Amino acid sequence: MDLARVIGRVVTTHKIEGLEGVPLHWIQPLDADGKHSGQPLVACDSAQSGPGDLVFWIDGREASFPLRVRFVPVDATIIGHVE
């Protein structure tokens, strides 16, 4: 799990089967000090996040596990909020 800040929403006109109804967000990965760490990326949202939220996210094969349909082709998924 890594930290990120949600910096925007992504609107699509077509989604891959299995991702219908799954919100997509732009996230900015952060390091332990809260500074930018790498380039922004698109992540699926399983935690009902919005712009400005500080979140946990995962990548790789495990990114599809929190979604309704498993093993869909996703690179990253938001899994929780930092309070």
Image (cartoon, grey):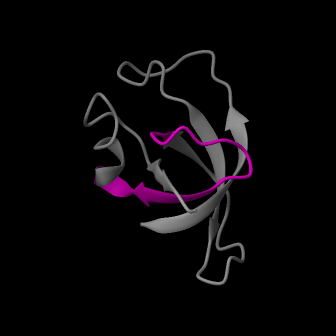
Residue 45: x and y in percent read 51, 40
Region of the chain picked out in magenta, as a range? 45-61
In this picture, residue 32 sits left or right of residue 47: right
Residue 75: x and y in percent read 44, 48
* Closer-to-camera residue (82/22): 82
Residue 81: x and y in percent read 53, 55
Q: Residue at x 50, y 40 (%)?
A: 44
Q: Residue at x 67, y 63 (%)?
A: 39
> In the rendered view of the protein, which quadrant contains the C terminus?
bottom right
In this picture, residue 64 sits left or right of residue 45: left
Q: Residue at x 59, y 42 (%)?
A: 49
In this picture, residue 21 sits left or right of residue 8: left
Which residue in the rendered view is the most extreme toward the bottom?
A: 33
Residue 55: x and y in percent read 56, 57
Specify whether residue 48 is painted magenta.
yes
In this picture, residue 7 sits left or right of residue 58: right
- Residue 50, quarter of the rendered image: top right
* Residue 54, placed above or below residue 47: below
* Residue 70, placed above or below residue 5: above
